[in-house]
Image (cartoon, rainbow, N blue to C red):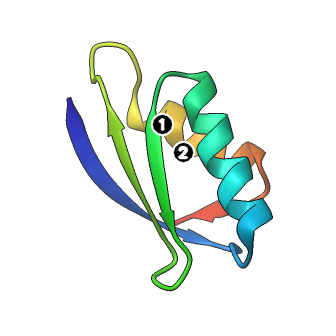
Amino acid sequence: MKNITLIVQGMSCQHCVNSIEGGLKEIGVTGKVDLQNDSVVVTFDENQVTIEQIKEIIEEQGYDVL
């Protein structure tokens, strides 16, 4: 399993947390949103999911991954 931290803009409330963490969970990725630091720590299996897929899921929820 690999852990990475992504910087994500546009998150401000619990709805944002639920959207991102829920979307990631659907593809088998564990995400932990930190609103104060504008970041999402993701834990995933590199053999199952790519970083690009993770970014895509977050962006589909309406947020910008830097």
- Where residue 34 appears, as percent x and y from the top left, is 48, 71
Residue type at numbered disc 1: Glu
Residue drawn where x is 71% and y is 74% of the image: 10
Mark linked to residue 24: none
Q: Residue at x 41, y 22 (%)?
A: 49
The residue singled out by tag 1 in the image is 52
Amino acid at the residue labelled 2: Lys
Q: Residues within 10 Å of mark 1 (few under 14, many from 20)?
A: few
As helix, strand or loop, the secondary structure at mark 1 comes to helix
Callout 1–callout 2 Cβ contact below 8 Å: yes
Tag 2, which secondary structure? helix
- Name which quarter of the figure residue 15 lies in: bottom right
Q: CA distance from mark 1 to mark 2?
A: 5 Å
Task: Choose between 58 and 35: the one closer to the eye.
Answer: 35
Horizontal and vertical percent position of residue 53: 52, 31
Vertical arrangement, residue 32 with respect to residue 46, above or below: below
Q: Nearer the viewer, residue 54 or 36?
A: 36
Residue picked out by circle 2: 55
Q: Quadrant of residue 51?
A: top left
38 in relation to 40, above or below: below
Quarter holding residue 35? bottom right
Q: Residue furthest front?
A: 14
Query: Which part of the image, by quadrant, shows the N terminus?
Result: top left
Report crowding for label 2: few under 14, some 14 to 19, many 20 or more residues within 10 A (C-alpha).
some
